[in-house]
């Protein structure tokens, strides 16, 4: 969570206490979004990164975390804009995430990871079935 907050520190300012300018450096009950709202958006940032990169080798985990943190920060800024510039900030965060995602995919494939490299992929169904026999229709 602190990785996400590091990209949008102004979103971690105390919004509950009047006149406060305290930067928490994380999301909590005194920030907007609060902890629960931020966690929901953070959790939604990871699956698209994992799907794009495929099976991750351990050496690229930090880069994968960085990409997911950028995506989550962009989602938070887009969901809780404070001024007209926040949509541009979200787009800039997404652009950084896109560039890092490309580096992640390249580094992961160079290290032996990527689509189809996960042993569990061999157990995944392909959803391809032979055509039904013509006589099968008579049994309905």
Image (cartoon, grey):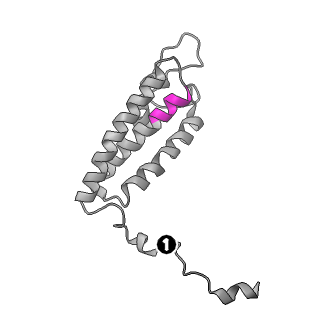
Query: Is 99 in front, or is 30?
Result: 99
Residue at image x 49%, y 28%? 77
Q: Give the left or right position of residue 56, taking residue 86 as reference.
A: left
Residue at image x 44%, y 29%? 90
- Magenta stretch, main secondary structure class: helix
Extreme residue in the left direction: 110
Residue 80 lies, with reference to residue 42, above or below; the image says above
Is 137 part of what is drawn in magenta? no
Query: Is 28 in front, or is 93?
Result: 93
The x, y position of residue 12, in whole percent, is 48, 25
The residue that disc 1 covers is: 126
Residue at image x 49%, y 21%? 13
Secondary structure of the residue carrying numbered label 1: loop
Residue 43 lies, with reference to residue 9, above or below; the image says below
Q: Is residue 7 visible?
A: no
Q: Quadrant of residue 67?
A: top left
The region drawn magenta spans: 73-80
The x, y position of residue 116, in whole percent, is 36, 67
Residue at image x 59%, y 12%? 18
Q: Quadrant of the N terminus?
A: top left
């Amino acid at each position: 969570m602190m990785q996400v907050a590091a990209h949008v520190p102004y979103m971690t300012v105390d919004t509950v206490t009047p006149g406060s300018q305290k930067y928490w450096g994380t999301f909590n009950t005194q920030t907007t979004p609060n902890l629960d709202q931020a966690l929901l958006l953070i959790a939604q940032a990871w699956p698209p990164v994992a799907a794009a990169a495929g099976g991750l080798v351990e050496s690229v985990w930090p880069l994968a975390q960085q990409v997911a943190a950028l995506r989550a920060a962009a989602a938070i800024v887009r969901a809780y804009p404070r001024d007209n510039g926040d949509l541009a900030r979200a787009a800039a965060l997404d652009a950084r995430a896109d560039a890092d995602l490309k580096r992640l995919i390249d580094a992961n494939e160079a290290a032996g990871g990527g689509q189809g490299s996960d042993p569990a992929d061999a157990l995944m169904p392909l959803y391809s079935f032979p055509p039904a026999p013509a006589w099968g229709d008579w049994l309905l």
